[in-house]
Image (cartoon, rainbow, N blue to C red):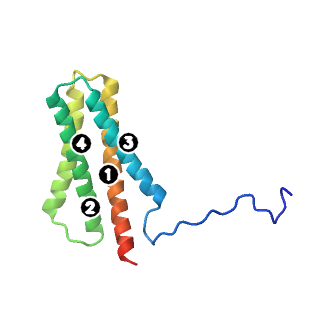
Amino acid sequence: MLGDKNEDLFPEKPREKRRLGEPTAAFKGAAWGALLIGVSSYLIGLYNAAMELNEKGYYIALLILGLYSAVSLQKAVRDRDEGIRVTNLYYGISWFALIAAISLMAIGLFNAGSIILSEKGFYGISFILSLFAVVTVQKNVRDTEEANQDK
């Protein structure tokens, strides 16, 4: 009967087998999903945009620079935190590249007269979402790899 102490209304679902320090499958999926949504919406928006091909190339190059520099900086920061040697030059270049990518995106969107304000917001948000997601994906890949090595 409903309400009896012996009756289990919410049976416990089987626990996921994972190693210590490894992110959950849901977290990994969410990170990859955010990256896919951010990059694909950015690229679909560029494909459909009424701008010159050289402008589209500029924004694609900024996305590539931003994604690479975000992953590089995340790795350098984490390496330093874990006591792995990272030169000051590489660390500084990583910061510079990320700041340059974000700044160039902001300057490009601010000065883009042919793009309406809502499109500027769309490109900015999808760019930042992509940067955040790629850092999270990199973290998940590294954590999973470390968990697999600690078998």
Which mark sits nearer the N-terminus, 1 or 3?
A: 3
Q: Residues within 10 Å of mark 3 (few under 14, many from 20)?
A: some
Quickly name the residue at label 4: 63
Residue 126 occupies quadrant: top left
Residue 8 occupies quadrant: bottom right
Q: What's the residue type where badge 2 is placed? A: Lys
Q: Residue at x 19, y 38 (%)?
A: 104
Point out residue 22 in the picture as x, y percentages from the top left corner: 43, 67
Which mark sits nearer the N-terminus, 4 or 2?
A: 4
Quickly name the residue at label 3: 37
The quadrant of the rendering that contains the N terminus is bottom right
Numbered mark located on residue 134 in the image? 1
Q: How far is mark 4 from mark 2, CA to CA?
A: 18 Å
Q: How far is mark 2 from mark 1, CA to CA?
A: 11 Å
Q: What's the residue type where badge 3 is placed? A: Ile
- Asked if residue 17 is positioned above or below residue 125 in the image, the reply reads below
Q: How far is mark 4 from mark 1, CA to CA?
A: 11 Å
Label 1: which secondary element: helix
Which mark sits nearer the N-terminus, 4 or 1?
A: 4
Q: What's the residue type where badge 4 is placed? A: Leu
Q: How far is mark 4 from mark 3, CA to CA?
A: 14 Å
The label nearer to you, 4 versus 2, is 4
